[in-house]
Image (cartoon, coloured by chain):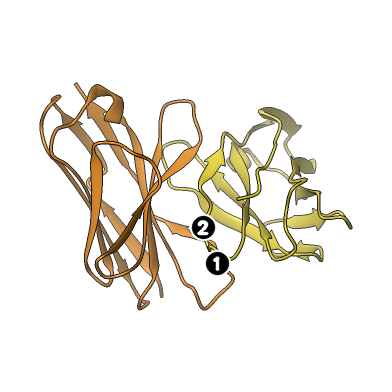
Chain colours: A yellow, B orange
């Protein structure tokens, strides 16, 4: 699996946009970028995924650079409930990821 | 709808005791099934995955084993637990017909004492 690199922690004020970066410089052409988040002591929750194009759903937007070596997850209006650990992973033909890394711990403050 | 059930939610076991964690999936057929472990302060590590009944692949050597006796049932076991087996265990499934990815269970917090 292509490895990903994320900052260990970030802060964001409530109501502001949270922009979480991820580097995946060794990603292959058929590998997707997935984002999950994990609230303490719960299973990770799917947020969004993409291959080449930017994606948006009811939870977030995913911006993938043209060279696909990095991406940014955007939570447009962060709330206190968005405080969680956010994982960026790459999944290819195998259909799974060997590990999720430590992710980014996002703290949304009032 | 597709759902996943994992139990128990918490478990405290003495060193040397056996372990059995169960995971079942509903609402889909022939899913890929996964067991992950998350040690304190660390990311999720894939332990086992299965693409079909009786087919188990192990990613990390350890004293744990997995079995898939039925299409939608995945069991994580150990004959003798070690202190280092403590952690948060997560079961997940993926549906091959779609763009991969996972749906996770709620996890089991295992403490070996």
Query: Residue, x 34% and y 42% (percent of image)?
Result: B89
Residue B51 at x, y = what percent?
Answer: 38, 67
Q: Is residue B31 above or below residue B42?
A: below
Q: Chain of mark 1?
A: B
Q: Chain of mark 2?
A: A
Whole-angstrom CA distance, mark 2 to mark 1, is 7 Å
B85 with respect to A18 (left or right): left
Residue A83 visible in the picture: yes
Q: Is residue A65 above or below residue B60?
A: below
Q: Quadrant of the C terminus of chain A?
A: top right
Query: B46 or B40: which is nearer to us?
Result: B46
Q: Give the SS element for disc 1.
A: loop
Q: Spot the residue most to the left.
A: B17
Which numbered marker is on residue A96? 2
Query: B68 or A21: which is nearer to us?
Result: B68
| Residue wearing tag 1 | B100
């Amino acid at each position: 699996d292509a490895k990903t690199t994320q900052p260990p922690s970030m802060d964001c004020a409530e109501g502001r946009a949270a922009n979480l970066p991820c580097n995946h410089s060794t990603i292959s052409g058929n590998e997707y970028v997935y984002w999950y988040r994990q609230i303490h002591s719960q299973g990770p929750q799917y947020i969004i995924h993409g291959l080449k194009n930017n994606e948006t759903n009811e939870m977030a937007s995913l911006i993938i650079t043209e060279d696909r070596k990095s991406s940014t997850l955007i939570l447009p209006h962060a709330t206190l409930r968005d405080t969680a650990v956010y994982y960026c992973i790459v999944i290819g033909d195998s259909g799974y990821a060997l590990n999720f890394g430590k992710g980014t711990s996002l703290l949304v403050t009032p | 709808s597709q759902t996943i059930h994992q139990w128990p939610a918490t478990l405290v076991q003495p060193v040397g005791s056996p372990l059995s964690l169960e995971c079942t999936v509903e609402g889909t057929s022939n899913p890929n099934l996964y067991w992950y472990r998350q040690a304190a302060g660390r990311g999720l590590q894939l332990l086992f995955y299965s693409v079909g009944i009786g087919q188990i692949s192990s990613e990390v050597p350890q004293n744990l084993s997995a079995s898939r006796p039925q299409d939608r049932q995945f069991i994580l076991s150990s004959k003798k637990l070690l202190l280092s087996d403590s952690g948060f265990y997560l079961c997940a499934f993926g549906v091959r017909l779609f763009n991969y990815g996972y749906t996770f269970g709620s996890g089991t917090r295992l403490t070996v004492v």
